[in-house]
Amino acid sequence: MTLVNIEDIKLSDEERQPCEVWTRVMGYHRPVSEFNKGKKSEYYSRVCFCESKAVLKLSEEDVMSVAAE
């Protein structure tokens, strides 16, 4: 078995390929590269949902409501 050091792998710009990002907007899947300027701005300002943070926040609110009773 041959081990390959990842640091030894180098790609030139010619070898790279762009990654196309798609997202769902108004019920359709579309590439972000085709969005108009306003929709791109809206897309890049989105905040991804993080379930673990939501559960922690819910837990804190439950503790506060129980403590208030």
Image (cartoon, grey):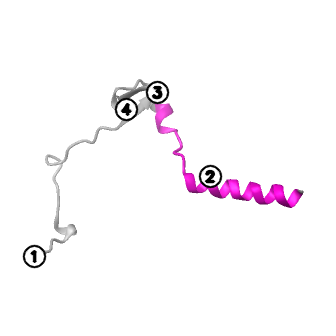
Q: Residue at x 85, y 61 (%)?
A: 67
Please name whichever residue, 32 or 28, is drawn nearer the observer in this view of the structure: 28
Distance, label 4 to label 3, CA atoms, is: 9 Å
Q: Look at the picture and state if 51 lies above or below 67.
A: above
| Residue 1 image-quadrant placement | bottom left
Mark-to-mark CA distance, 3 and 2: 27 Å
Q: Nearer the viewer, mark 1 or mark 4?
A: 1
Amino acid type assigned to the residue bearing label 3 in the image = Lys
Q: In the rendered structure, find residue 32 and report the number of the disc placed on it.
A: 4
How far is the residue under mark 1 from the one under mark 2? 45 Å
Badge 1: how crowded within 10 Å, few (<14), some, or many (20+)?
Answer: few
- Quickly name the residue at label 1: 1
Q: Position of residue 68 (x, y in %)?
A: 88, 57
Give residue 50's position: percent from left, percent from top: 54, 51
Q: Which residues are magenta?
A: 41-68
Q: Are marks 2 and 4 in contact (CB under 8 Å)?
A: no
Circle 2 SS class:
helix
Q: Is residue 52 left or right of residue 24?
A: right
Q: Disc 1 marks which amino acid?
A: Met
The Cα–Cα distance between marks 2 and 4, rounded to whole angstroms, is 27 Å
Q: Earlier in the sequence, mark 1 or mark 2?
A: 1
